[in-house]
Image: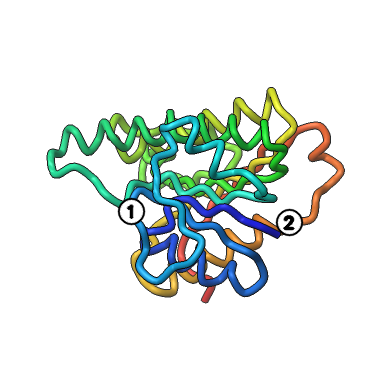
């Protein structure tokens, strides 16, 4: 399988790329290049033509709508993150559907549930309640874009809402979940609805 991995210059992106390359051909994409990494596309998904170029010949996509390079100004940083999550994800999904890509793994965040009290145990069946903050809203916007494409087009999206990925064991657990989501065997129910959400928190130990 040929897999397009966005957000490849981030720490999590590099860990995912290393794991995927054991079984797949991986095309890396980000705003900045990763030194010594082959088959790397440097560009911005907010450019629709670049998004179309990026998905050519791709079988599946792992989308980390994370900006590896952010402006120093806090307000501008938030605006860039929101724009990339919404417009960048839209261009990617539009290009993917036009190219016939069958599956996208969207790496989102449990921050979309941050509006609930801390002592609540929320599940995938609960409605997202993001806070009015850029990190929370950016993750929610990327989810909304993907979900609407699933409703209108013939594409499957597995949305993984990650918790913290600071420690090595947390990143390893997240990488494992991403790889499993990419290779999940289709179920009969996918013919009716192809939007799946899973919460991934903590480590596998």
For the residue pair 200 and 61, the one nearer the viewer reads as 61
Check disc 2: other Cα within 10 Å, few if <14, some if 14-19, many if 20+.
few
For the residue pair 63 and 100, the one nearer the viewer reads as 100
For the residue pair 40 and 123, the one nearer the viewer reads as 40
Q: Is residue 98 left or right of residue 113?
A: right
Residue 129 visible, this orientation: no
Residue for badge 1: 32
Q: Is residue 65 left or right of residue 124?
A: left
Instruction: Residue 198: give x, y in percent of width and height.
Output: 59, 49
Check disc 1: other Cα within 10 Å, few if <14, some if 14-19, many if 20+.
some
Of the two numbered discs 1 and 2 in the rendering, the one whose residue sits closer to the viewer: 1
> Residue 20's image quarter?
bottom right
For the residue pair 141 and 95, the one nearer the viewer reads as 95
Kindly identify the residue that appears in the image at 43 percent across and 44 percent down.
Answer: 65
SS class, disc 2: loop
Kindly identify the residue that appears in the image at 48 percent across and 30 percent down.
Answer: 48
Instruction: Residue 11: give x, y in percent of width and height.
Output: 37, 64
**Between disc 1 and disc 2, whose residue precedes?**
1
SS class, disc 1: loop
Q: Is residue 194 left or right of residue 45?
A: right
Vertical order, 27 against 108 (above or below): below
Count of labels shown? 2
Residue for badge 2: 184
> Which quarter of the image is occupied by the N terminus?
bottom right
Residue placed furthest toward the left = 73
Instruction: Residue 143: give x, y in percent of width and height.
Output: 51, 35
Q: Is residue 86 left or right of residue 151?
A: left
Q: Are marks 1 and 2 in contact (CB under 8 Å)?
A: no
Vertical order, 155 against 69 (above or below): above
Kindly identify the residue that appears in the image at 41 percent across and 35 percent down.
Answer: 85
Q: CA distance from mark 1 to mark 2?
A: 30 Å
Kindly identify the residue that appears in the image at 29 percent across and 29 percent down.
Answer: 132
């Amino acid at each position: 399988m040929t897999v397009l991995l966005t957000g490849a210059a981030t720490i999590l992106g590099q860990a995912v790329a290393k794991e995927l390359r054991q079984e797949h051909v991986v095309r890396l994409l980000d705003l900045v290049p990763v030194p010594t990494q082959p088959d790397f596309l440097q560009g911005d998904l907010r450019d629709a033509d670049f998004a179309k170029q990026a998905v050519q010949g791709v079988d599946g996509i792992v989308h980390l709508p994370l900006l590896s390079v952010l402006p120093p100004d806090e307000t501008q940083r938030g605006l860039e993150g929101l724009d990339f999550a919404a417009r960048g994800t839209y261009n990617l999904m539009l290009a993917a559907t036009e190219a016939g890509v069958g599956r996208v793994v969207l790496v989102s965040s449990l921050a979309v549930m941050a509006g609930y009290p801390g002592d609540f145990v929320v599940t995938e069946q609960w409605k997202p309640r993001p806070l009015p903050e850029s990190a929370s809203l950016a993750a929610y916007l990327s989810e909304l874009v993907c979900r609407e494409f699933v409703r209108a087009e013939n594409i499957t999206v597995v949305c993984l809402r990650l918790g913290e990925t600071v420690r090595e064991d947390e990143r390893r657990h997240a990488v494992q979940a991403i790889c499993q989501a990419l290779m999940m065997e289709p179920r009969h129910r996918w013919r009716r609805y192809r939007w799946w959400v899973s919460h991934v928190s903590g480590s596998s130990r």
